Structure formats: structure tokens, C-alpha cells
Image (cartoon, rainbow, N blue to C red):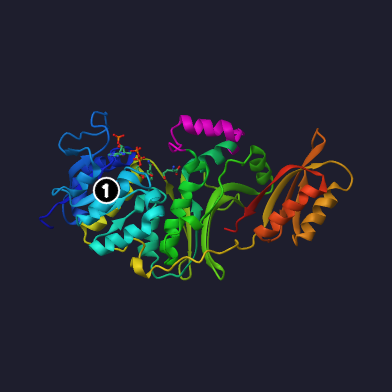
Amino acid sequence: MSAQPLRLGIAGLGTVGIGVVKIVQRHPALLAARAGRTIEIGAICARDRSRPRDADLSAYAWEDDPVALARRDDVDLVVEVMGGADGPAKAATEAALAAGKDVVTANKAMLAHHGNALAEAAEAAGRVIRFEAAVAGGIPVVKALTEGLAGNEIRRVMGVMNGTCNYILTRMESAGLPYDTVFEEARQLGYLEADPSLDVGGIDAGHKLALLAAIAFGTRVSFDDVRLQGIERISIDDIRRAGDMGFRIKLLGVAQMTGRGLEQRMSPCLVPADSPLGQLQGGTNMVVVEGDSVGQIVLRGAGAGEGPTASAVMADVIEIARGTRLSTFGQPAATLAAVQPAAVAAPAPYYLRMELLDKPGALAKVAAALGEAGISIDRMRQYGHETASAPVLIVTHRTTPDAIEHAIGAFAATGVVQGPPVALRIESV
Ligand code: NAP
Ligand code: HSE
């Protein structure tokens, strides 16, 4: 065992930071045995020193400024768990690298926006940045892609990477409640980010997908190329009707390299109700990886929370303590390819829900609009109704998003479709 302890500087003492402190305090012998050296806390930092925290911090040096923490002589490794794409998180990360220190972070927003530059800065300084906790909390998917699956050409990475959205969608289904009611419940339970659009708008999950895509496909992080659509327009009717057809709605991220370029999308999709993704309940995350040699593997677990996220941070800390030095995205930053984004998503079957005037020839007009867009109908169902319009569901054969958009545009001219139709992709899983 090395005589030199590894001394952490923990910037951020919220949910994740306190979780890290607790693991260091609870398991000193276990960590030392696995890391080959003791892991200690050199200094800590948060905004408000007087705030009560759920751990005894009296033994640690305090800094008000995360950049000063990063520069301290008694800190060997900076654990950045403050959050935010820019500001103090980025400043502390850059200061740590410049001061010759490795960084472990849980901050997907910072890496989605600045991951390329930070990876280059780390390599220039001869340091590493690790970020297991940034994607799917406690699920070791970054290590799975970077190490366990390093011998594979990755075909596709997909998954449910935002627990709050999965909670909302599964709670709507199980309790038969509308979106607004469950959104409010999620807020009361403290599940939502301070800016809820990060969750329900698919942005948080899009950040995570962009990071996984970089590792999986050896490309530069390209969050701007992730096609984002949130769950705000999903109604209880969509959930029920999709269920009738044997599907569940998930906020699903998919990244795949196609002949037309890299496809990255985060959007509500239908998946078979009896598939592993369809069965995923509550705030749990699931990531599915498909490699040319390994086939399909499924990783499932807690995507957030004190214990699971701190578990992932500590895995990175131990990796560094052991002397393992991995490039941020699994290969040197200079070798990451520029992203050629796929202009359109690969064809897929689609689910369409619309309100149709219940009068002779209405269905024929919709079928004609679909036919003219080159879309073939696989299944359809009309529901009983007491109003002038009938809820109609159509499942199409494989088609392109452009064709769906074209058909929806043409629906308006039929004069029989009431309000905007809902169109959701059906993902094969
Ligand atoms: P949090 O509970 O809001 O805690 C943030 C901490 O950062 C607080 O202790 C805060 O200080 C401190 N902080 C913020 N600005 C600061 C500044 N300018 N100077 C010094 N300290 C500052 O956040 P969290 O949930 O632990 O999340 C931390 C990071 O982990 C984020 O990047 C988040 O996206 C990521 N993450 C979180 C989870 C999760 O389950 N919570 C899961 C995966 C990833 P005060 O306490 O004094 O206000
Ligand atoms: N807001 C995230 C989620 C947690 O709901 O999954 C942190 O990644």
C-alpha cells in the first residue's frame, strides 16, 4: 500500500457531495484496501458555511471559493459536485487541471457543453477527468462503455436516463392522473431540477446521451446535435391508448451511427410494454448497449439520489487512486472525430393519435393523406365517443419523420382532423 494518501477537495456539499463524505467516513479500510492507499478529505467547499448538513464536517478545512479549494496544496483530486454548465463548476475544474490535479465530476451539463475543451485541457496538463456519476447516477455505464465494452464496435446506445420523467410517465399510467397533476406531485417530492424544463424538456437526459455517444462512437461531444423533444405534451389519453396497442411511452434516448451520420435523439417513444424498457417503473434508469461482439446488454438501477450518485463518484476516485489513467471519452481528445449529424432519423413505425369528425368519408380522407405521403397503415382503432369527434389511433408501417410531418401538414386540409395530432415514434428494442 502506498504511504501517500489521496486527499480529496470536495466542491459542493449538497445531495451528492454529502453522499461522498459519508462513504469516505463509513468505509476507510475498504476504500484503502481497494485503492491501495488511504482516501482522505483535504478540504471542502460550499456557498453557505452555516447551513446544517447531514454529516460531521468539523475535521475538514473549509473554503468559500471553489477555485481556491482547487488550488490548495493539501488537495490532490477535486470532486466537483456543485452543478451548472458554466460558472464556479467550470472555473474550479479548469483551476484544478491547471494546478496539476485530477477531477471527478457528476456534472453532465458542464461536460455536454464544454467536454471537448475540458478533455483537451486535462490531456495538456497530464491530468484526467472522470464522470461516471454524470450519466444515469449509480449505473456504471461510463465504465461499461469505456472499459468493459472497449473491444466492441458499438451499434446503438439507448435508454431511459431521466428518472423524473420516468416517474411522471409511470405514475400517470398507474394512477390514471393527468400530466399537470403528476408534474406537481413530482415538484412536491423534490424530484424536479430547479429549472424543471431540464427534466421534462429532455435537456438533462440529452446531456447524458451526448456524453455516452462520444464514448460509444469515438466522436466529439455534440450536444447541439441531439434532437430534443420533452414529455410536456404527453396526455393520459396517449398513455392509455398506447397501452391498448401493447406499448408504453418512455422518454427514450437513442444514439446510433448510421450510413447517413450520427443520430442522437431524446424524445418520447413507444416501446413494447413487455420489453425491459417498457417494464421500467418509477425513477429508475435503464441503459441498453448493443455491440458487434457482445450483442445487447441491459444496465438498470438508480439514476439519482445521494447513495447511488456518490457510489459512482467514489468508483472514479478509486480508479484514480489505483493509478488508472483513462482519457475522458475513452480515447485521446485529438482522435475524437467531428460529428456528422444524420439529417433525418432512421425510418420507424409511428403511432398517430387524432380527433376525427365522425362523418362519412372522414377516415378515407386521413387514409388518403397518409397514402399520398407514402405511409402505409399497419393497424388502426376508433374509440367510442359522445362528442362530434372520435378518437382515432393509427400505427403505421416503417416511415420517415419527414413523411409523418408531411402527412400531418396534409391533415389540416382535410377539414376532418380536430386539433393537432400526436405523432410518436415506435422504437424497436
Ligand atoms: P445540490 O444538492 O444543489 O448541491 C450543490 C452544492 O454546490 C451545494 O452544497 C452548494 O452550496 C454548492 N455550490 C453551488 N454553487 C456554489 C458556489 N458558487 N460555490 C461553492 N459551492 C457552491 O446539487 P446535487 O444534487 O448534489 O448535484 C450536484 C451535481 O451532481 C450536479 O452537477 C448534478 O447535475 C449532478 N448529479 C446529481 C444527482 C442527484 O441525484 N442529485 C445525480 C446525478 C448527477 P450550498 O449547500 O451552500 O448552497
Ligand atoms: N434530474 C435527474 C433525473 C437526476 O431526474 O434523472 C440527476 O441526473
- Tell me which residue sits at (82%, 44%) in the image: 416
Secondary structure under tag 1 reads helix
Could you tell whether 276 is left or right of 62 in the image? right
Question: Between residues 300 and 235, which one lies in front from this camera angle?
Answer: 235
Where on the picture, by quarter, is residue 391?
Answer: top right
Is residue 324 among what the camera can see? no
In the rendered image, residue 187 lying in the magenta stretch gets the answer yes
Which residue bears the numbered disc 1? Answer: 92
Image x and y of residue 190, in percent: 43, 33
Please tell me which residue is depicted at 27% across the width and 53% down the height of the picture.
Answer: 94
Toward the right, the furthest residue is 360
Magenta segment includes 338: no
Q: Would you say 185 lies left or right of 413 here?
A: left
Q: Tell me if residue 418 comes above or below residue 188 in the rendering.
A: below
Q: Quadrant of ligand 2?
A: top left
- Residue 55, horizontal then vertical, whole percent: 24, 34
The magenta segment is: 173-195
Q: Is residue 378 visible?
A: yes
